[in-house]
């Protein structure tokens, strides 16, 4: 039996709970996207985790709401209608620089990152008769061909537009675009209606699995070299190397060297550091909880937490990662 003097016990409790003593009571809104996609259920999982772990003692609550997606989420954060949001990395880059489809709002200097959630892996597949050297370097040579690169006004076609511009391709004028989701795009390629597709998504992607199982050698997945990665990223520090291991897909005999951009958890700079620290810490101490709710979060790991983030980290998140020994580049440190 151990015995403590009262003063020693108080001191010990102060050390144990000092980290959370400065947290501010708050009820936050987390903006996601439509209820049929991945953003919404992942957002519900995150908000549930915060409620379970932080609301009882620290009085920090969170509720997920549906939205129109990344573009609207930038506005919701800017106008204070939400304090957290899930968004595509490219939209975070647009918001930070005041460019792209949300340029009229100007640079959003208050936007901060918390963590990469899961990555949209670029999966370019073309008909083998136009595959050339098997890299995305063949795509500029397909001008005039039919290509399926996403639905109209989707994040998919927006990211494809940005990526391929780095290779000198203006997809809206250089290609005969066939608009559609991943399943219809894969079917169009299989049926010879288009020469190529790209399905940025978590791996494995169902449409690619079905495609690779049914077509054999008639289609070729395109790899991305380091030089092509640099050209496609075009200085955004957004897309990073991603290797799809051999055997992930049917008839995939070798590693597929491609690239990926993050879907990330964003917040406002003015949130209390301690609150964001506790939320970040809670996420990484309870990954199994999240992963049991939605498989997309199985891609999350502390080692990949800052991969491809488009805007500086909130100081609360940066403090947690520093404690974990993660080397944070200067561009991700808020000034």
Image: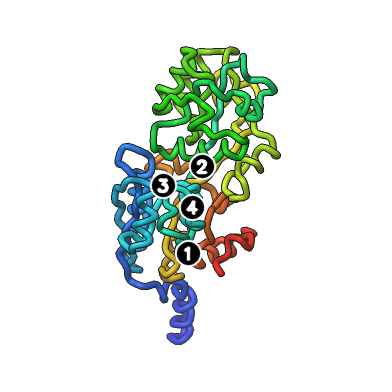
Please state which of residues 32 and 51 is positioned toward the viewer in this rendering: 32
Check disc 2 and report its element: helix, strand or loop.
strand
Q: Which residue is mark 2?
A: 119
Q: Residue at x 57, y 48 (%)?
A: 238
- Which quadrant does the C terminus fall into? bottom right
Q: Residue at x 36, y 56 (%)?
A: 75
Q: Which residue is mark 1?
A: 109
Q: CA distance from mark 1 to mark 3?
A: 30 Å
Q: Earlier in the sequence, mark 3 or mark 4?
A: 4
Q: Mark 2 against mark 1, which lies toward the viewer?
A: 1
Disc 3 + disc 4, Cβ < 8 Å: no
Q: Mark 4 against mark 1, which lies toward the viewer?
A: 4
Residue 201, x across and y down, in percent = 48, 35
Q: CA distance from mark 3 to mark 4?
A: 33 Å
Q: Earlier in the sequence, mark 4 or mark 1?
A: 4
Residue 182, x across and y down, in percent = 43, 27
């Amino acid at each position: 039996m151990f015995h403590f003097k009262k003063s020693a016990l108080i001191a010990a409790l102060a050390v144990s709970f000092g980290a959370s003593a400065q947290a501010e009571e708050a009820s936050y809104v987390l903006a996601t996207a439509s209820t049929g996609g991945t953003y919404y259920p992942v957002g519900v999982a995150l908000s549930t985790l915060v409620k379970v772990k932080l609301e009882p003692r620290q009085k920090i609550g969170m509720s997920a709401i549906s939205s129109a997606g990344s573009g609207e989420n930038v506005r919701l954060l800017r106008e204070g209608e939400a304090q957290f949001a899930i968004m595509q990395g490219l939209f975070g880059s647009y918001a930070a620089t005041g460019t792209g489809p949300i340029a009229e709002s100007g640079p959003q200097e208050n936007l901060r990152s918390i963590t990469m959630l899961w990555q949209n892996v670029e999966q370019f597949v073309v008909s083998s008769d136009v595959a050339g050297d098997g890299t995305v370097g063949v795509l500029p040579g397909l001008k005039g061909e039919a290509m399926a690169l996403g639905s109209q006004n989707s994040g998919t076609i927006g990211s494809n537009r940005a990526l391929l511009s780095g290779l000198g391709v203006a997809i809206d004028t250089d290609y005969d675009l066939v608009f559609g989701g991943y399943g219809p795009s894969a079917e169009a390629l299989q049926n010879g209606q288009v020469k190529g597709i790209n399905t940025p998504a978590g791996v494995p992607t169902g449409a690619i699995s079905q495609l690779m199982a049914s077509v054999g050698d008639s289609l070729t997945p395109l790899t991305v070299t380091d030089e092509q990665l640099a050209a496609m990223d075009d200085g955004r520090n957004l897309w990073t190397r991603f290797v799809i291991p051999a055997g992930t897909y049917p008839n995939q005999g070798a590693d597929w060297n491609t690239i990926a951009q993050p879907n990330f958890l964003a917040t406002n700079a003015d949130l209390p550091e301690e609150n964001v620290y506790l939320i970040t810490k809670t996420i990484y101490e309870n990954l199994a909880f999240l992963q049991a709710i939605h498989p997309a979060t199985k891609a999350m790991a502390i080692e990949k937490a800052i991969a491809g983030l488009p805007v500086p980290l909130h100081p609360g998140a940066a403090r947690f990662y520093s404690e974990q020994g993660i080397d944070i580049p200067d561009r991700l440190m808020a000034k």
